[in-house]
Each structure stands twice: as C-alpha cells, then as structure tokens.
Image: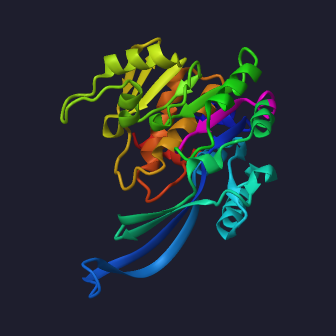
Amino acid sequence: MQELLNQLCNRKILVVGDLMLDQYIFGDANRISPEAPVPVVDVDRHQQVAGGAANVALNLRSLGAEVEVCGWVGKDADGERLHQLLDQQGITFHDRFHSSECPTIVKTRIMVRNQQLCRLDQEAPPNQYALKQEDIEWIAEKSANLDAVILSDYGKGILSDPLIDSLLSQRSEKQPIISMDPKPRRHIAHKDLDLLTPNRSEALQLATLHPLPHEPFPAKEVCQRIHEKFSPRNLVITLGSEGMLLSQNGEVTLNIPTTAQEVFDVSGAGDTVIAALTLALSSGAGIEKSARFANHAAGIVVGKVGTATVSPQELLSLLVTL
C-alpha cells in the first residue's frame, strides 16, 4: 500500500463535471410545528463543503494528485465560496468556467442527529450548463498533457457526447486514462472509455434490466449487456454492502467484499471510488490492485457523515486493523 501511495503523488488529473456546493444544517428536533405537521429543527451549526465533481477533485487532492477542475460555477456568493474551498486545497479552477448565466448548484441537507431529514436543491435546467464548442475544444486540448481525465456526471448538463468524442480523439494510445461515473438518465454514449463506475441501480439502467424486488443482482447479464453497448476497458460496479464487482470484456472477473466497519453516510462514496480507482490506474497499477485500493478508501469514507475524503494515513491505519 505504501508503495502505491508513493506512486500516486503528483499525478496530473483533470476532473470535468457538475460542480456543487454542499451545505449541511445540523440540529435537533423535539417538537412539531403548530403551523404544519412537520418537525421544528433547532439549528446548532452550519457546514459548507465542495460537492459533486468538486468532491471527486478533493478526493484526488487528498491522495496526493495535482488536480484541475472544469465545471460551471456562478458569479454569486455560493460560487465564490466553492471557488474558495477548492483554492484552499490547492485545486486549480479555471476562470473561464465562472459564469453569470449558470447559477452555482447548491444542495442543502437538513441533518437531525446525523440523519438526513430533507434536502433542498438550487439549480438551473440542464441545458443552461451545456458546454459550448470552444469550451469542449479547450478541455480536449488540455487533456493531452495529463495522466487522466475523470468525467463526473451528476445529471446537471455539462457532460455530453461531443465532449467525450473530442477527448477520445485527442488522446494518444496510452494517455490520458478517461474514466466516468455515469448517470444513465442522460443517455450519453459513453463508449470505449477506460473505466466506468456505475452503482447497482445505474448498472441495471445501463443494461436496460428491471429485476423484481429481492432478486439477486444479475451480475453476468449486466456485465455482458454493458460491454455490448459501451465497451469499457474496465467496468467496476459498486454494490454497497456487497462490495465491488469487476468486469472486463463482458465477463465478471472478481467480487471484492466491502471493508466498511460502520456506515453513517454513503453520499460521496462513488466520488471516492472513481477518484482512487482512476488515480491508481494512472500510476500503472492493474485493475484488481486499483479496485482493492478504492474499496479500502470507500470503506473509510462511508464511516463519515456527509461528503468526505480519505487520506493516505487513514488508509495505512485501516490496513493495520484488518
């Protein structure tokens, strides 16, 4: 593990996707409002963290990578705060993606005793976040000198077929590695990528399968169908408490059990997985070693409340206890 962690340092990674500001309002609820049948939350504290594709960037940076991000941030107070959070961690945000036409995407979660009571979303329609052709060309040109590009799709509109096509046409034979955490509802033709990391639900959607409740996950059929439609070099399906499923060429190659000791919050776990996986692959590690590394990282993150990152020290400490 220490050898792999040393290899991750200073890898140059670009994250392209839906940047968000995640807000948390923590408090307690001991009474019902006289105005409506809803709990009254006595607010204790607030917290703001980088979310969405920005959380992928934070995970990469925490593991030692040099990170740049591309995604729309509004010229508003929330956008300034998100920019500040990225800058504090040494993550490069390019000013061309500061826009007065695209409000910053904000998710506000009301947390009562570490349980999410509700979520408030502020965002514009997806077409408002679409990239112009000059932006796509700029991103593709920049990617040629990097070790990897992560496409972080939260379904808000920035990722598109033209962007993926441009990235694929720009890269050389071996770099950059291009990986994607997909949102099937966007119907993007994410074909011939180096890595796809859907969760259980997303994998079923990509495979156009609708199993009945309580049926076991149809791993073989899912992997075959995704390979036929999208031909990813590596497919890693995250299965929550059941760990990770690895597939190549449409065949299931390995099932890795989870290392999570406690689960408080799964939000952001997918960000950690694709960050750790892509970073390890870009350093020359094989898919199995990279997946086990990402599985350990995700096992730590789900034990934290809210979107979170994992440090090399935490990973090394986990291995001592296993």
Judge from the rendering whether residue 238 lies leftward or rightward of residue 66; answer left or right: left
Rendered residue at 47%/17% (across/down):
229
Left or right of 254 in this view: 180: right
Q: Of 195 and 288, which appears nearest the observer?
A: 195
**Residue 161, x across and y down, in percent:** 62, 29
2 is higher (above) or lower (below) than 80: above
Residue at 36%, 25% (x, y): give it. 208
- Picture coordinates of residue 240, whole percent (x, y): 35, 39
Q: Residue 63 or 40: which is nearer the viewer?
A: 40
Residue 131 seen from this side: yes
> Which quadrant is the N terminus positioned in?
top right
Position of 7 relative to 20 (above/below)? above
**Residue occupying the point 48% across, 42% down:** 270
Looking at the picture, tell me which residue is in the foreground, 109 or 290: 109
Horizontal side of 121 relative to 151 (left or right) equals: left
Q: Residue at x 51, y 33 (%)?
A: 293
**Where, quadrant-wise, is the C terminus in this rendering?**
top left
How is the model colour-coded? rainbow
Q: Which residues are magenta?
A: 141-154
Choose top left, top right, bottom left or bottom right for residue 203: top left
Q: Is residue 43 above or below residue 191?
A: below
Q: How many marks?
A: 0
- In the image, residue 85 lies at what x, y percent? 67, 61
Is residue 245 in the magenta section?
no
x%, y% of residue 249?
A: 47, 11
Image: 45 above or below 76: below
Q: Is residue 253 visible?
A: no
